[in-house]
Image: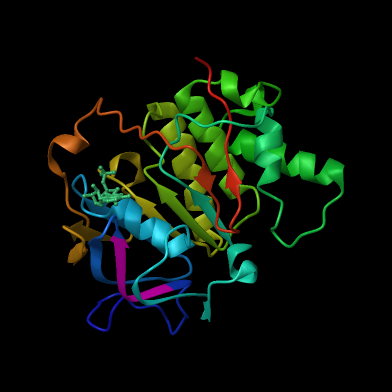
Amino acid sequence: MTAADPYDHHDASPAITAREVRVRLGGLEILHGIDLDAYPGEAVAIMGGNGSGKSTLVRALVGALPASAGSISVFGSPRSRATAARIGYVPQRASAGGGVTATAREVVQSGLLGAGQLLLPRDAKARALAALDDLGVANLESRDIASLSGGEQQRVLIARALVRDPDLLILDEPMAGVDVPSQEALSQALTARRDAGASIIIVLHELGVLAPLVHHAVVLEHGCVTHIGEPPRALGVHALPGHDHVHAHADLPQPDGSTFSWEVRP
Ligand SMILES: Nc1ncnc2c1ncn2[C@@H]1O[C@H](COP(=O)(O)OP(=O)(O)OP(=O)(O)O)[C@@H](O)[C@H]1O
């Protein structure tokens, strides 16, 4: 948070700090100087209407997009492979891609790669299964990821981000297309990570079941921060129930610089 922020962080250092971050896309400046901090044990919601710059901001935070100006530091250092190993990232829901055939468990297990931990295969498998179980999808472990429904794929991807017990979790609209019981499982999994000291940044259109998780919101409008503090109650039509916010992506950029993609069923 900024100096004017009322929250007391007991002198902890932020997990991530953005200062005056500007991003240009297609010749236009999309983000016009964003400041943001998230502290250990804190969940920050990034909110705002369609096109306000939420996904652009989180993509800049994880290094999937370059900032044209400003600075971003993670655990007090510029982003690097070492800092990437401490981040779990769930991009905006993917609905298309091309490439690998993998089971749900293999997808989750791939989240352990680059995490700086050397695990025996059986331990990696057990971690992946536990992460799937936390999201209520352990029964899908042997299913081909491409054969899963959109909401099932989303839960597997969230398990993939959680499997390495990241110190910083960045999720872009994780509730899109996820049913209420699964939202509750996700809420519990995120609350457990937050209470264990992780910092969480989460793009949301409405708080829903995550209201108790979120400490405060950063609201964007036209690429600028217009509000920091109490989360707004609703954000117009985009927050209506049934609004399924799905964007097609060819791949899923990961904080370690790799990409992850798969075929979806026709
Ligand atoms: N590659 C691009 N080239 C030009 N403009 C882009 C590009 N990608 C995104 N934009 C524009 O940047 C703005 C912010 O987009 P962004 O996806 O960050 O919004 P958002 O707040 O996440 O929206 P939504 O709620 O619809 O997901 C939009 O006006 C969008 O059209």
| Residue pictured at 43% horizontal, 35% vertical | 184
Q: Residue 150 vs residue 196: left or right?
A: left
Q: Position of residue 132 (x, y in %)?
A: 63, 35
Q: Residue 56 vs residue 160: left or right?
A: left
Q: Residue 239 vs residue 138: left or right?
A: left
Q: Main secondary structure of the magenta part?
A: strand
Q: Quadrant of residue 129?
A: top right
Q: Is residue 144 visible?
A: yes
**Residue most extreme to the front:** 27
| Residue pictured at 18% horizontal, 47% vertical | 49
Q: Position of residue 244 (x, y in %)?
A: 30, 28
Q: Position of residue 230 (x, y in %)?
A: 21, 60
Relative height, residue 202 to residue 40 (above, below): above
Q: Which residues are magenta?
A: 17-24
| Residue pictured at 66% horizontal, 31% vertical | 100
Q: Is residue 14 rendered magenta in the image?
A: no
- Count of picture labels: 0
Relative height, residue 140 to residue 134 (above, below): above
**Residue most extreme to the top:** 266
| Residue pictured at 53% horizontal, 17% vertical | 265
Q: Quadrant of residue 179?
A: top left
41 or 63: nearer the eye? Answer: 63
189 or 60: nearer the eye? Answer: 60
Q: Residue 214 vs residue 91: left or right?
A: left
